[in-house]
Image: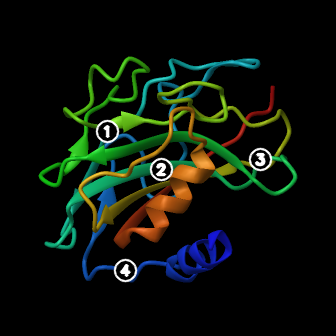
Amino acid sequence: MKKIVVASCLATVGFAAQAAGFTLESPDIAPNGTIRNEQVFDGFGCTGDNVSPALEWKNAPKEARSFAVLVHDPDTPTGGSGWWHWVVINLPPQTTGLALGAGRSDRSALPAGATQIATDFGGPGWGGPCPPVGDRPHRYRFTVYALKVDQLELPPGATAALAGFLVNANSIGRATLTGRYGRNK
């Protein structure tokens, strides 16, 4: 029975159709632009302020019942899994953005009901860019997903990968903004 359920779930996962005109922007990050030190992680040799950027989305599918925001660096040398920098789920359907600094680990700056999943830094909340010294600038993909469910039910301690799987399985549209960051020292 479990194999059938898993196969059924896998069959529903795929790339959600791009909603016509669904866009994601940030006053803090230009498309393919360099991410500012304000957003950079403070640790692992990086000395940024670790403040999540403001995000704004428009023209989401009208049938969206909630939103999720995932930030991922596919260029981190982890053997293929990349690095999860921020995972926010269960954003109410009337949400059209997140304010500068919304990624505090205590959730105090998020809309009511929203939840943050632990990132690859080990806890919930924004963890800014901090690629290895000398790597080419990494890509940081900010993606907002419009979901067909009111909430994602995740077990305590759920990983960012599990959250991403369920987000994609329930997505009816998405919009992405990519920023870049590298460091020489």
Question: N-terminal of the two: label 4 or label 1?
Answer: 4
Q: Which mark is residue 76?
A: 3
- Disc on the earlier residue, 4 or 3: 4
Q: Which residue is mark 2?
A: 70
Q: Which residue is tagged 4?
A: 18
**Residue lying at 62% horizontally and 79% vertically, measured from the top left:** 4
Q: Secondary structure at mark 2?
A: strand
| The disc label shown at residue 54, or none | 1
The quarter holding residue 55 reads top left
Q: What amino acid is found at the position of numbered circle 3 in the picture?
A: Thr
Q: Are marks 3 and 2 in contact (CB under 8 Å)?
A: no
| Disc 4 + disc 1, Cβ < 8 Å | no
Q: Are marks 4 and 3 in contact (CB under 8 Å)?
A: no
Mark 3 or 1, nearer chain start: 1
* Residue 111 x %, y %: 21, 34
Residue 82 image label: none
Q: What percent of the width, then of the height, locates residue 52?
A: 42, 31
Q: How many marks?
A: 4
